[in-house]
Image (cartoon, rainbow, N blue to C red):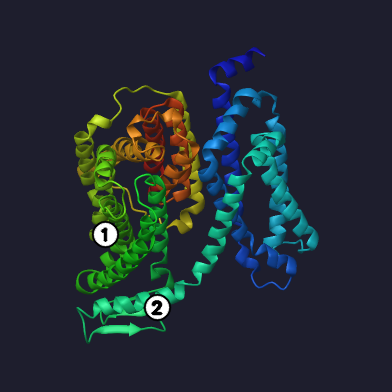
Amino acid sequence: MEHTQRIRSFLPSRQGWCGRAAIILGLFAAQGLWLSYRFDAASIAGSEDGWRRFFELTPLLLRFAISLFIAVAVLGGNRLWMHAQTFAETAQQHHRWWIWFCWQWIAFGFLSAASFVVFDEGRGEVPFSAVWGMIWIVSALATSICCLFGLAPSWFWGNFVRRERGILLAGLALSLGATVGGRLFQRLWIPLGDSTFRLVEFWLGFFYTDSIVSDVSARLLGTTTFCVEIAPQCSGYEGIGLVSVFVLTFLAVFRQTLRFPHAWLLLPIGAGVIWICNSLRIATLILIGTEYSASVALGGFHSQAGWILFNLVSLGLMSAALKSRFFTKSVDKTVRAAGPATPYLMPFLALTALSMIIAAMVEDAMSLYPLLVIASMYLLWLHRSVLPRTWQCSRYAVLHGVGIYAIWVGLAWLSHPTSGAIEYPLPDCRTIPGLTWTVFRIVGAVVTVPLIEELAFRGFLLRRLTQIEFQAVNYRDVPLAAVVCSSVAFGVMHEYWLGGIVAGISYGVVARQGRNLADPILAHAVTNGLLTMTVLATGATWLW
């Protein structure tokens, strides 16, 4: 009894529930990831069994569930957080969560066993039958329901559904539209790819006449010395999707400043501009491969030019809209409101642009990493006025940093074979150049990167999603929807985007609990420091 009281006095009830919820949700996500990587629905494609044809839809159902969770979190995150706070402060001590936690793992065991039969038939000893299909469906539902009841009892979810049914219905509509729309838009890849092929060929005509190689059926385009295959995935569909998401987020954040319905025109304008820029990117890649270096064209330029264009188009579109009287209600007011964001965003934007340019134009881009660290330190010094003035070692922040390190390593290990993460040999620290590079790499990972990224995502974006005058926002008042949205933006900037989203949510919670920016910087530094030690000890540079 005394031991329990000491634990409760050290960890307040609300923080205890938040930590338990994070663990339960994290383990549930890990279960889903393991099932996704271990079993492939494509293995049963074309099956004549009606039951098995149903299981071909499981990836689509998973995407629907994820989009539903994100939609509800964004639309009703603040109200959901209020319900959760009320439960955490009043009734959580009567909730026997550990019982549901145990049942959840038992149900997951049945789900795993059924998955071996459903998706591995022909390789296992047990043949598939309708009984195993029913076991899979029931155990999947039981795993999800037990996870929800582990977070809160049934009466909590009943109250939430009754009071927030409008948000749930809107989330269902959005997630269903996103899932079905994604399937429909995939069919546009081939015609859009044909249009992109013709447009790239048009651009190349300004530089080459007799030396152009063009094969529409094989989708090969280039010159007699350098050719590339323009697959349907290179049609610009991904760029159009990314810019559309950015524009929609921009419209939501600046809805009080923008003029509607004029602002809706930014969606087709952004889609058209990024599609044209994508064709110019492919034409430039062919020019670089023909006139300069094939390795640079297929290496750094191919991987970085798309992100450079996405940032230029998105930020340029936002800047132009905020300065246009056609799209905004008051230009002067907008400019004044955007001014305080400069010291928070400038280090991140400048460093991102510099790193992309180096990666696109230099074959061994990592050799110039010390240059990035020096530039980062200079940018931080110029904008030191927004850095935290007081620092303290928060145990809460350190624990979150350690937890994110473990999650990051696990997710990176699962997705590493197909992630495309760059691997490179570590330099010999017994030489002066090798030791110098290693020291700069450690300083960059542990010091400059956490400072710059936290200034941009927790210092600015997290609070800017709450209100326009973001500097007046107390971190304690930041809604859950802002934490989720800023974390998604933080995640897509990383190679392992899922780990980045989880890390962003964790750092956002740390900022909210500590009511300052110093704590998420500390948590971020702890995560990166542990990753750096792991890389130096094992040579697994793909973790960086």
Residue 387 locus on image (x, y percent): 28, 30
Q: Is residue 137 above or below residue 272?
A: above
Q: Which disc number belongs to residue 360?
A: 1
The quarter in which the N terminus is drawn is top right
Label 1: element kind: helix
* Left or right of residue 157, residue 182 in this image: left
Q: Give me the C-alpha separation between circle 1 and circle 2.
A: 26 Å
Query: Residue 476 shows which numbered tag?
Result: none
Q: In this figure, which residue is indicated by the disc labeled 2?
A: 194
Give neighbour class at mark 2: few <14, some 14-19, many 20+ (Cα, 10 Å). Answer: some
Q: Quadrant of residue 281?
A: bottom left
* Residue type for callout 1: Ala
Above or below, 245 against 90 in this view is below
- Look at 59% across and 18% down and name the residue there: 8
Which residue does the image show at 64% across and 70% down from the upper left?
A: 45
User: What type is the residue that disc 2 sits on?
Assistant: Asp
**Mark nearer the N terminus (1 vs 2):** 2
Residue at the outermost top position: 2
Q: Residue at x 53, y 68 (%)?
A: 184
Observer able to see residue 286: yes
Question: Taking 38 as reference, is 230 left or right?
Answer: left
| Image x and y of residue 541, in percent | 38, 48
**In which quadrant of the rendered view does residue 429 lie?**
top left
Discs 1/2, front: 2
* Left or right position of 504 against 426: right
In-front residue for pair 504/159: 159
Of residue 325 and residue 31, the one placed in the foreground of this image is 325
The foreground one among 396 and 225 is 396
